């Protein structure tokens, strides 16, 4: 019997990589169930009910959102803390960040920035693109649609705000946003965050000298000493300071260093409540791992602070711990203390530029 010849035009089937529900390529494991876990009917129905509640709260295209937030802010806060349904996450992020309003007020601006302007940061952006979420299928292809979109958003921002320009950590923030919205939407959400449309501006995280990072690390250091004194003392003995493990927590809002499913839940709250959730989660994870961390010598301690155990990364355990930690008043006091020593943020930026 003659062997069937493969027609030249017939495509050879390609084995696609196994990916998780967020689009990240899965690591091979020995799990016998083929890396999948079936969801029970009751879990599926509960999720559907939750989505219906959220759709009712938002309205068509977000038309009811502002009215609902004004009427029932506590309900909104509670639901956001439980996690925004993934299918609605992109829209809700735009609504709670104020970026939707910026987009509507600035028609055509993004296109102008991408097509007609040039940036001094273009080569730096190109160099870093492949380092952003390298295991996600959207960003894996060299010069593919994901990498092109990421380049466009970062380049546009570096032109829009030439004082900030481009800093490496911004790629993880823009990359995260692009997984949930269009280029233009992601750009305006980046603007909303850095310029402070709703909460205090983030741009100080990326300005020369990273002045806001320095302030946040000072605040975190004091909180660790006050809330976890035994661990704070151990850090001092081993000469560990927050810049060795926590800078990326603030610069990327955990999108670089934490598992993606947990980072998303933190981002839900971060966009609604502001940067205090970063401090709360940071203290919570240190508290959760406290008894192990206080026993570790310097090298193992550094490794442990950059590689938390899987059970510590469970959002249903870690986030309730974080929500129970009260830091708002103390953060304000520590900010004032830091500014007495170093000047206000704008003064620190001017001083750094003058030294340069």
Image (cartoon, rainbow, N blue to C red):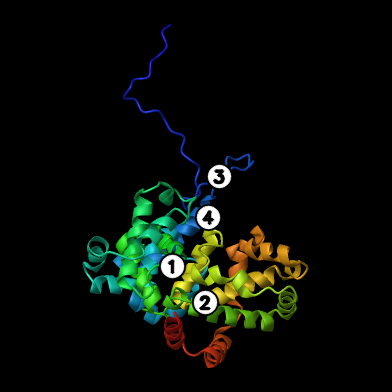
- Percent across and percent down for residue 15 are 47, 34
Q: Is residue 65 left or right of residue 304?
A: left
Helix, strand or loop at label 2? It is: helix
Residue hosting label 4? 43
Q: Mark 4–mark 3 contact, CB under 8 Å?
A: no
| Residue located 33% across and 72% down the image | 99
Mark positioned earlier in the residue sequence (4 or 3): 3
Q: CA distance from mark 1 to mark 4?
A: 41 Å
- Percent across and percent down for residue 32 are 63, 39
Q: Is residue 262 left or right of residue 179?
A: right
Question: Toward which corner of the image does residue 271 lie, by quadrant?
Answer: bottom left
| Residue located 47% across and 65% down the image | 169
Furthest residue toward bottom: 340
Residue hosting label 2? 213
Residue hosting label 3? 36
Label 2 packing within 10 angstroms: few (<14), some (14-19), many (20+): many
**In the image, is residue 41 above or below residue 312?**
above
Label 4 packing within 10 angstroms: few (<14), some (14-19), many (20+): few
Which of the numbered marks, if any, corresponds to residue 122? none
Assign the C terminus to one quadrant of the image: bottom left
- Percent across and percent down for residue 154 are 36, 63
């Amino acid at each position: 019997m003659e062997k069937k010849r493969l027609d030249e035009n017939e495509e050879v089937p390609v084995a696609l990589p196994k990916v998780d529900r967020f689009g990240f390529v899965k690591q091979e494991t020995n799990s016998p169930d083929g890396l999948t876990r079936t969801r029970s009917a009751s879990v599926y129905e509960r999720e559907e009910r939750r989505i219906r509640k959220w759709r009712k709260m938002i309205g068509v295209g977000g038309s009811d959102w502002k009215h609902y937030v004004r009427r029932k802010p506590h309900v909104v806060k509670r639901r956001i803390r439980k996690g925004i349904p993934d299918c609605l996450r992109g829209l809700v992020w735009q609504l709670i960040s104020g970026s939707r309003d910026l987009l509507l007020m600035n028609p055509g601006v993004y296109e102008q920035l991408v097509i007609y302007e040039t940036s001094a940061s273009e080569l730096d952006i190109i160099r870093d693109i492949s380092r952003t979420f390298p295991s996600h299928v959207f960003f894996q292809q060299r010069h593919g649609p994901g990498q092109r979109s990421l380049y466009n958003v970062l380049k546009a921002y570096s032109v829009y705000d030439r004082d900030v320009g481009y800093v490496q950590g911004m790629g993880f923030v823009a990359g995260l946003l692009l997984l949930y919205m269009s280029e233009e939407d992601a750009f305006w959400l980046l603007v909303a965050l850095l310029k402070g449309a709703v909460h205090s501006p983030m741009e100080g995280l990326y300005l020369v000298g990273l002045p806001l990072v320095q302030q946040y690390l000072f605040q975190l250091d004091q909180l660790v000493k006050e809330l976890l004194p035994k661990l704070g003392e151990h850090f001092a003995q081993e000469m560990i300071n927050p810049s060795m493990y926590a800078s990326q927590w603030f610069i990327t809002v955990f999108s670089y260093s934490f598992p993606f499913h947990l980072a998303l839940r933190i981002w839900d709250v971060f966009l609604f409540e502001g940067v205090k959730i970063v401090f709360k989660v940071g203290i919570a994870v240190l508290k959760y791992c406290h008894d192990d961390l206080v026993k570790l010598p310097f090298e193992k301690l550094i490794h442990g602070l950059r590689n938390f155990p899987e059970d510590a990364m469970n959002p249903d355990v870690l986030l309730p711990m974080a929500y129970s930690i009260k830091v708002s008043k103390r953060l304000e006091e520590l900010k004032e203390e830091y500014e007495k020593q170093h000047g206000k943020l704008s003064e620190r930026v001017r001083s750094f530029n003058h030294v340069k």
